[in-house]
Structures are given as structure tokens and as C-alpha cells.
Image (cartoon, helix red, strand yellow):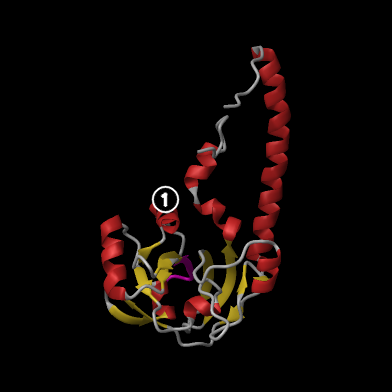
Amino acid sequence: MTRPAVASRDEWLAARAELLAAEKALTRGLDALAARRRALPMVPVSEEYVFEGAAGRVRLAELFEGRRQLIVYHLMWQWDLDEGCPGCAAVLDGIPRLPGRDTAFTAISRGPWERLAGYHAAHGWTFPMYSSFGSRFNYDFHASLDADIAPVRYNYRSATEHALAGRPLADEQPGVSVFWRDDDDAVFHTYSAYARGLEPLIGAHALLDLTPLGRAR
């Protein structure tokens, strides 16, 4: 196990001040990146997606629950085990509430509702969850991959590009998508992220990054 070098308090303070300058530069860079993210253009969502949840069948616009913004986490479904992905569950365990931010949060999976409902209850999650089974939703937003249904493009790269990089794709992948709703219930897609783009959702990683061992297991 590698540990940091031992130093005097003055040596540590000098090194910490140098690191602080780099941290502040990164914070300013992240602020600028967030501003660019907010300025991305929106794409109208014309497909009439229908989901199944605790209250029955609902449209995409209804998932906003009257709010302006909607964040959707694409929960991978493990068909061989008939349950959700443990990695996705770990992410969802740390999702905070978003009070007073005009923003709704939900998780959507292709898992059938009769199984998904029990999975949701077993984890004790308070945010709503819906099944997109039978719709194109997860395929159109590139979290479920089948070239016969929608073009395969995970994390904005084709299946061929992933294969050439030595990372062939499984049929189910994690992701997060963000939507905007107008007063007339018109819905627009504003943002999606995948792979390491999901790391900001994992609070445990941020805490571990403060430690000498980092994310080491």
C-alpha cells in the first residue's frame, strides 16, 4: 500500500496552498463548463412515450409532476437476473432530494413494472420509478442498445468505435437525460451523459477523492 510522504507542517502548508490554486482553477473551469451545458440548444421530443408506474400508464410530460425540468436516470436492467444493476442502485442510493428547484427526478428502466415495483420498494427509494418496457425511450436516448430499433451510439461514439477501443458494448448501459417542459406540455431534450459523465452523481467518489487511498478498493 502506497502512502503519502511525511513532511513538516510548514512543508504541508506550502504543498496544500499550491494544490489549492489548482483546485480553484478547476472550480472556475467547472463553472464555465456548467454554463456551456446550460446554454446547449434543446431538441423537441415528438415521440409519445408511455411509461408504467405506481399510478398506471403515464406520458413523458406527466413525469415532470408540474415542474419545469425533469432529470431521468436510465437504470440498467439485468435480464439474466431479472433485477436492476447494482452499480446503478448504488448511484440511486445517493440521489438527494431537489426541493424548491422546479425539477423532478425519476429513474426509468426497461425492466417490466411488476418486477421494477418490487425492486424500487426493496431499496426504499422515495423518488418515482417507471418502466419503459415496450417503448423506444431507452433506445432513443441510447441507454439500451439494439441497432434494429435505434442507431447504436453510446456516449456519442458508435459501436464500432467502442469495439476498436477494446470496449465492446453490452445491450444495457447507464445514463442520465435531462428534459424541459413548456407551459403547453411540449417536452424538449436538453442534455444526456453516460459512462464517466455520471461520476458527479456518485457522492461516495467525491468523498473518497479527498483521501490518500482515493477510490482504491
To which quarter of the image does residue 119 belong? bottom left
Q: Is residue 66 above or below residue 123?
A: below
* Residue type marked 1: Gly
Residue 16: x and y in percent read 67, 25
Residue 211: x and y in percent read 55, 31
Callout 1: few (<14), some (14-19), or many (20+) C-alpha neighbours within 10 Å? few
Residue 13: x and y in percent read 67, 20
Is residue 99 shown to the viewer in this render?
Answer: no
Query: Element type at marker 1?
Result: loop
Residue 9: x and y in percent read 64, 13
Q: Which residue occupies the extreme top position in the image?
A: 8
Which residue appears at 62% of the width and 66% of the height?
A: 155
In front of the other: 1 or 93: 1
In the visual, does 187 lie left or right of 116? right
In the visual, does 29 lie left or right of 206? right
Is residue 176 shown to the viewer in this render?
Answer: yes
Which residue appears at 73% of the width and 41% of the height?
A: 25
Q: Which residues are magenta?
A: 66-74
Residue linked to disc 1: 94
Which residue appears at 26% of the width and 65% of the height?
A: 118
Dominant secondary structure, magenta = strand
Q: How many marks?
A: 1
In front of the other: 43 or 75: 75
Residue 195 counted in the magenta span: no
Query: The N terminus is located in which quarter?
Result: top right
In the visual, does 154 lie left or right of 82? right
Q: Is residue 189 above or below residue 87?
A: below
